[in-house]
Amino acid sequence: MEIARETVRLFTSKGVAATSADEIAEAVGISTRTLRRYFPSKENCVQPLLAAGAEAVTRRLRTWPSGQTLREAVNDWEDGDVLMDEPDIAASLDLIRLTRTEPGLKAVWLQTYHAYDGQLAEILAARAGCDADDLHIRIQAATINAALRVAAEHYAWRERDGRAEPGQNESAGLSEALRTAVLTAAQGLPD
């Protein structure tokens, strides 16, 4: 996470093109060789930060109480319940904003979310008593996952464009956007 945070800081202050892997490694006190061992490109350095939000939602869905529909469970979520620390939320939102203009970051963003389709399918399959490879389950998981990604983008871009709710903190605003995403996606899912 430290590498991801420093990478976002450098990307937002200098720009993606003007930031080198050497600068990222130096900022976190490791060698460029070590950095490259874990991250094949400088854009990949942000993946842990992007994954943190998806991991938080997945963790919350794993605790989905039996006997509750998905809509009921999501309605019980409280602001900040599914998110991370406020500084990481701010950095994630900065990063999501950069995906609009940086194709390398957009690719990492999409790959990160794609990786969670399988985890969501496992959660839904366990609840439905069927296999995670079932086409209906995979489509439901992909629907929820896509809704989460779109909600995060919508919130990040709207907040940046000055259209966010005045006085709303980022954690509460993003939490509400993600809750809305799951509730909207769940409208087409069986209870």
Image (spheres, rainbow, N blue to C red):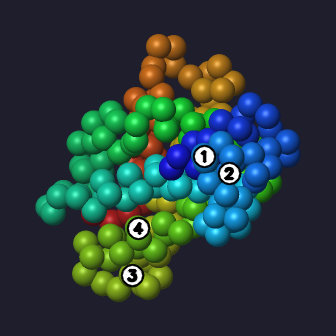
Please name the amino acid that badge 2 sits on: Ala
Rate crowding at label 3 as few (under 14), some (14 to 19) or many (20 or more) other CA atoms within 10 Å.
Answer: many
**Mark closest to the chain's N terminus, 2 or 3:** 2
Q: Is residue 151 left or right of residue 160?
A: left
The circle drawn on residue 25 is 2
Residue 100 pos. (x, y %):
75, 44
Q: Secondary structure at mark 2?
A: helix
The circle drawn on residue 140 is none
Q: Secondary structure at mark 3?
A: loop
Q: Is residue 185 left or right of residue 153?
A: left
The circle drawn on residue 120 is 4
Quarter where residue 124 is shown:
bottom left
Rate crowding at label 1 as few (under 14), some (14 to 19) or many (20 or more) other CA atoms within 10 Å.
Answer: some
Residue 167 pos. (x, y %):
47, 13
Residue at 23% from the left image edge and 42% from the top image edge? 76
Q: Secondary structure at mark 4?
A: helix
Quote the CA–CA distance across marks 3 and 4.
9 Å
CB atoms at circles 3 and 4 under 8 Å apart? no
Q: Secondary structure at mark 1?
A: helix
**Mark closest to the chain's N terminus, 4 or 2:** 2
Tell me if residue 187 can be seen: no
Residue at 27% from the left image edge and 36% from the top image edge? 78
- Name the residue carrying label 1: 28
Quote the CA–CA distance across marks 2 and 1.
5 Å
Q: Residue furthest right?
A: 17
Please name the amino acid that badge 4 sits on: Leu
Residue 90 pos. (x, y %):
54, 32
Q: Residue furthest left?
A: 67
**Mark closest to the chain's N terminus, 3 or 1:** 1
CB atoms at circles 2 and 1 under 8 Å apart? yes
